[in-house]
Amino acid sequence: MTSTPGTALPSGALPRQRPARHAGPVATRSDEERDGVALTNLDQELFTGAGVTKRELVDYLDGMAPRLLPALAGRPLSVVRALRGQKPFMQKNVPRYAPDFVRTVSFWAESSHREVAYALCDDRPTLLWFANQRAIEYHPTLTRADTMDTPEHLVLDLDPPEDAGFDAVVAAAHLVRRALDEAGLRGVVKTTGAKGVHVLVPLAPGPTHEDVAGATRALAVRTERLGPDVTTTAFIRADRGGKVFVDPTRAGGSTIAAVYSPRVRPGLPVSFPVSWDELDTVVPSEITVRTAPDRPDPWADPAAHPAPQALPDELVAEGRTIPVARVQAMHEGKRRKRAAERGE
C-alpha cells in the first residue's frame, strides 16, 4: 500500500502555527457530548460496506487516545474522511469551520500555489472532533512541526502486488530485518491496516533528511539484493514483476498511516504493532477497531522499543550513489512516452 497522501511537506519550511485558544465548539444538535465536543449521527454506518458505525469509530479513537495521541501530537496531519454519499477523500487543509481548539500549522504548497493549514492533533477534544468529522485514517508526518529538520525515524514501507498474500510481505519484512542487522541497526514492525507492513528505525539526532533518504535507498537496495525473487525497488508499478515493493522514498516530509490508525476498509482494520516473532502468524484483517484495543501491544513496553540509533556513515554514503526513485521514474516515464509516440 502507499500511504503518502500527496505532496510531502518541504524540508526546512518554516511553519506558521495557530495556537489553541481552548474555546469550545459551536453548539450543535448532537447525540451526545464528550469533553465539550458535540457528536452527531453516531448510529450511521461510516460508509457503504463498512459494517461499522460512527459510534464504534468514536469509541475506538476515544479509548485508544492514550496510545494514538503520542503518535500524532505535534505532527502536521492529513486525514481520510468518509462522508455519507461520497467516496473517501484525503484532507490536508483544515476547514474554516474547525473549532478554535484545533491547533494548525501552515506550509506553502508549491503544487497548489497556496498555504495549506495542517492540523496538529494534540489532545482528546481534537481527536474527538476529527472522529465526528468521520475522519477514519490518520497520516502524520515523520517529523514534528517545530523540528521539521530533525528526522526521527527511518521507514521502509513494504507494498505487495495486488494478487499477493500477506506471506509475501512477511518474507520481505524478514529480508529488511536482515539488511538492518547487517548495517548494525534495529527496527520495529507494524501492520499498515491494509496489505503491507512498515518497518521503523528510531533515529538519534544528527542526520539530515538527505542522509536519511540516502540510507533508506541503500537499505531498500540491500534488501532487494538479499531477495531478488521476493522484493523490488522498481518505482514504476508495471516494472515490479509481481514482487513486494520496498519503497525507498519515505523521508523528509513524507507521511505514513499512524500506528493505531483505522483504515477505510470493510470492518475498519487498524495499523498495529507486532513483534518480529508474531509477524509470521498475524492476520492483519483480524486487527480491527473492535479487536485492537484488547490485543497484546509489543510497543506498550518501552524496553521492547529500540533506542534511537545513529546512521552508519557507509550506509549514507552508499545511498548518495543511488538515484532518487521518483526522479528516475519520471525521466523513464517521459522516455517511454517519447518512444511510444515514435512507434518504437
Image (cartoon, grey):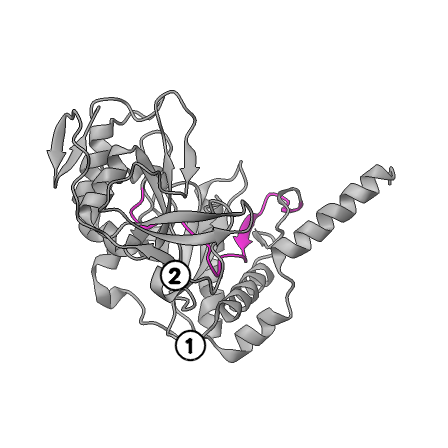
Asked whether residue 147 is in view, the answer is yes
Magenta stretch: includes residue 259: yes
Q: Nearer the viewer, residue 18 or 179?
A: 18
Q: Residue at x 16, y 31 (%)?
A: 27
Q: From the viewer's perspective, is 193 left or right of 179?
A: left
Q: Which residues are magenta?
A: 239-261
Q: From the viewer's perspective, is 266 left or right of 291?
A: right
Asked whether disc 2 touches disc 1, contact meaning CB atoms under 8 Å apart, the reply is: no
Give residue 300's position: percent from left, percent from top. 21, 58
Magenta stretch: includes residue 91: no
Mark positioned earlier in the residue sequence (2 or 1): 2
Disc on res. 328: none
Dot 1 falls on a residue whose secondary structure is loop
Dot 2 falls on a residue whose secondary structure is loop
Above-or-below relation of 10 to 115? below
Q: Residue at x 58, y 47 (%)?
A: 243
Q: Quadrant of residue 99?
A: top left
Residue at label 2? 143
* Residue located farthest toward the bottom when viewing the structure as drawn: 313
Give residue 326's position: percent from left, percent from top. 62, 54
The amino acid at mark 1 is Gly
Asked whether residue 257 is in view, the answer is no
Residue at label 1? 206
Give residue 170's position: percent from left, percent from top. 44, 50
